[in-house]
Image (spheres, rainbow, N blue to C red):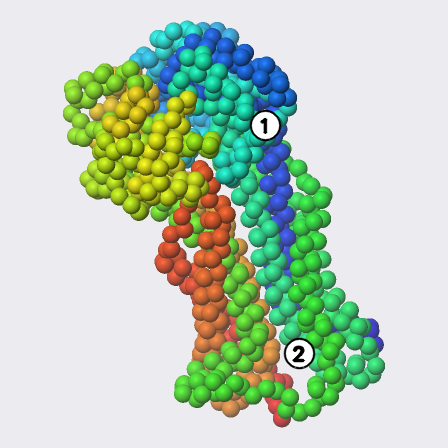
Amino acid sequence: MRKLLFKRLRRSLWRIKLRVFMVLFLITLATWLSISMAEHTRNADSVYQDMYTETNLGDLFADSKGSFYPASSFHSACSNLSSFASQRGLPINSCEARLSMSAFFLDEDTKWASAKLHGFESGQVNKLYYTSGHWPENAGEVVLDDHLAEYMDLEVGDTFPILVGGDQHNLTLSGIAVSPEHLFYVPEGGLFPKEGGYAVLYLPVEELTSMAGIDANSRNRLLIDLEGEPDYDLQDTSEDEGVALSPLKAELLQQLSISGIETVQVGDRGSIYSVELLRQDLEGSKKSLPLFTIVLAVVSGLVIAISMDRMVRSQAREIAVLRTLGVPRNQILLDYMMVPLLLGVIGSSLGLLLALSPFGSEGLTSWYFSFFGIPIVKINHYPDLLLKLWSAVLFIVLAFGIRPALKASRLMPLDVMRQGSGKKPAKWLVKLTNSLPPTMGLGVRSTFRKPQRLAVTILALGLALILTGSTMLMMSSMEATFKDANSAQNKWDTEISYLPWNNESISAWIDSTEIEKSQFVARYFANASGDERPFMVLAMGDISTSKNALRTTDLVSGKLPMVGANPAQVLIDEGMALHLNWKVGEKQEVVFGASTMKVEIVGTTSDMMRTMSMHLSDFEAATEMGANLIWIQHEEGIIDDDIRGLSWSVTSSREMQDSIDELMETQAGLMAVMLFVGWSIALAILLNTLLINLSERDTEFATLRILGASRGTLTKILLIEHAIIGLFGGLVGAFSSYFLASAMVAEFSTWQWHLPLLVNWWIIGQIILYVFIAAILTTPIGIWRINKMDLIEQSKDIS
C-alpha cells in the first residue's frame, strides 16, 4: 500500500512539474540570497577587523582642525596622560602628533578639486597599507590614496600636482596606499563619495610644513594607541559602550587644556566618520538578514502549502480508498510530508551551491568593497552559517507542509465518497454576481469560491514585493531627503572654508571681486553635555526661510531664533531632537572642546546632518570664536588661485549635487536586483496559482466550451479573476511595504544617518501596478492551456 501511495505521489508531482519547478525556484532563491548575505556580512566583519589590525587603528584621537599648536604641547599632554591610563589598565603603546591640512589637486578634467594632506613622522598608529611603492624617501615625494590612484589610473613614479600655501607643487608618487581613516572616501564634512573628486595624500610632516609655509613644529592632531582593543562608544546608541575609555578621554581633554590646546575635539574610533559609517552599514545588513531569510522562506512555504492543498484535493478519492483498505493515518501523513521534505532538500541544496559559486557571497562581497574602494577582500565560506541557513529554510518549508499533510491524513472515506459534498457560494457573493454581467459574474465567483486559498495567495503576493516595495520607499525618501533637500536648501554656488586669521584677506578678496551675494558663517563641532556624539554648529549672519536666501532654513516646528537672546536661541534638526530627546522650549548645555555654552531650543529643522543653527553674533559673543567659512553666489570662473591659496577648502554646490546623484545611480543597481527578485517571486506565485485553478476547473471550462462559450469569454473570465487577485495582492504588498519601510527606518536611523520616511504615493501606486501587471501577464498562459484542452476527454467526467 505504501508503495502504491508513494508511486501515486511521484506521478502527481511529475504531472505538475511546472508548479514543482516554481516551488523549487522560490526555495533556491531564498537559500541562495540568505546564505550570500550572511556570508557577506561575516566576510565584511573580518575584512574590517583585518584592516584595522594590520594598520593599527588608534584608540583615542584629538583634533584641533584649523588651529595649530606646537608638537611639544601634544606630546606633553600625552605624557601626562600615560600614568593615568596605566592606572586604568590601558597603558599607552604609542602616541603621535600629526599635521593635517586641506589642499587642492588637478583632477582628470584639469580642474582644482579638494585634497587632504596628512603629514607625520613614524607612522606607527593608523599605518598605511601599501598596494604599491613605499614611504617617501626623497624631497618632493608623496603617497597617494589607492581610491583616487585607481580611478585616475596613476602609478608609482607619476607626477601629481597640488596647490597648498598659495603655490603649486608637482610631487612624485613614491607609493599608493590605503588608510583606515579613509576607507569610506569622502571629503571632510561631506556625506557622499564622488569618484575622482577628492584626493588624500601622505607625506613627511617637515615636507608639508615647508610647502604650507608654516612653523615646522606645527601640529593639529594627536593619535594614541592603547594596549589591547578597548571597546569604544558607538554613535548610534544613547549608551556608552566605551566605559573604559570615557575617563581617559576626559583626562586627555584636561591635559590638552593644561598644555594650552583649547580648541580641540577628543574622541575614540567612533568619532572617525569612515569607521563608524562602515560599522553602521554592516550592522544594518546584519539586522535585515533574518527578515530577508524569513520573508523569502515563508513565501516559498505558502506556495508549497497551496500546491499541496491542491494535490490532496485531487487525490482525495485515492486517499479514501487507502483509508478504507486499512492504511493508517500516520503512514499517509509521513508520505505526504515527503513532498515538502524532498522539495526543501533539493531547493535548499541548489541555493547552497549557488551561494558557493562566484554568483553568491563572493560576487556580493567583491561588489560591495569595490563600491567603497577597499582593496583587501578575503572571501571565506563558513560551514556553520551554511548549515544554519540551509536548515532554517528547510524547517520553514516543512512547517508550511504540515497542514496539508495533516489534512490528507484526516480525510474520512464517507466524506469524500458522498455526493454533494461541495459548499454553496456565500449569500453575499451570490447577490453580488447576480447583479453583474454573466462573464464578469463567473469571474468574480470563480475568484472567491476558495476564500482560504485566495487569502493565502494574496498574502504570498504581498510578501513577494514587501522587500522590493520597502526598498523603493526608502530609496524615494533618500532621494527626497538628500538630493532634493540639498538643491532646495543651498542657493550658494561655492562654500569657502578658511583659517580664522585669514578673515581680513578673505573679506578683501570678496570686496575686490564681482560677487553677487555672500555670507560669513562659523562652522564648528560640539557635543551635548554628558553625550560625546558630535554635531555641527552652524552660526550664520542670516537665518531665513526665504527661498532667495543663500541657505534656506526648512523650519519643521517652532520659530526662528532671535538675535541677542539670553541664553542664545538655536534651531536643531529632527535627528538631534530624536536621539538626544530634546524638545522645543528646553534649555540645554553645549560643549565646545573645554568650554560650555547655554542655549535655548526654539525650533527644529530637516537638515541632513546633525546640525545646530544659531546667529553668528550670538556664537561669537559666547565662544570668542569667529567665522571660518563663507558662502558666495557668483558667475562662472570667479574662483581663482588667490582665493584657493587663502582657503582651507573650496566646495562647489554643483559638486555636492553630483556626488548625491552618483550615489543614487549606484543605489539604482541595488534597486534593479530587488525588483528582479520581487518580480520573479510574484510571477512564480501567480503562475502557480493560475495552473492550480486551471487544473481544478478543466471540467468546468470544457463544459462552457461544449455549451458554446467562446475563447474570448473564457479569456475575460480569467482576466477578471487575475485582475482581482493582482489588485488585492498589490494593495497588501503596498501597505506591507510601507509598514516594513517604517520599521526599517526606525531601526536603521542613527546619529549620523537620520532618514525620515516620506510617503510617496507614486511609489505605492507603482507597487500595486507591478503586481497587477504581473497578474495580467500570466493570463495568456492560461488561455494557451485552455486551447490545448481535449474536450472529449474532459467531458467524460461531466455527469
**Other residues around mark 1 within 10 Å, as few (<14) / some (14–19) / many (≥20):** some
- Left or right side of 456 for 489: left
Q: Mark 1 points at which residue?
A: 244
**Position in image of residue 469 (x %, y %):** 46, 56
Viewer-proximal residue, 754 or 148?
A: 754
Helix, strand or loop under label 1: loop
Residue 652 in percent (x, y) is at: 30, 30
Secondary structure of residue under mark 2: helix
Relative to 148, say whether 166 is above or below: above
Along the line of sight, the residue nearer the viewer: 671 or 554: 554
Q: Can residue 253 be seen in this view?
A: yes
Circle 2: residue type: Arg
**Eye-nearest disc, 1 or 2:** 1
Label number found at residue 495: none
Query: Between disc 1 and disc 2, whose residue precedes?
Result: 1
Disc 1 residue type (three-letter): Ala
Q: Answer left or right for 672 relative to 654.
A: right
Looking at the rendering, in which quadrant would you find the C terminus? bottom right
Residue 134 image point, x, y percent: 54, 14
Q: In which quarter of the image is the N terminus?
A: bottom right
How far from the left and from the top, in percent, is residue 41?
59, 41
Circle 2 sits on which residue?
A: 313
- How many numbered marks have been drawn onto this rendered protein structure? 2
**Figure quadrant of residue 51:** top right
Residue at point 47%, 53% (across, down): 741
Q: How far apart are marks 1 and 2 (CA)?
A: 65 Å
> Quick check: 676 above or below 376?
below
Assess whether mark 2 and mark 1 are in contact (beta carbons under 8 angstroms).
Answer: no
Q: Is residue 484 left or right of residue 578?
A: left
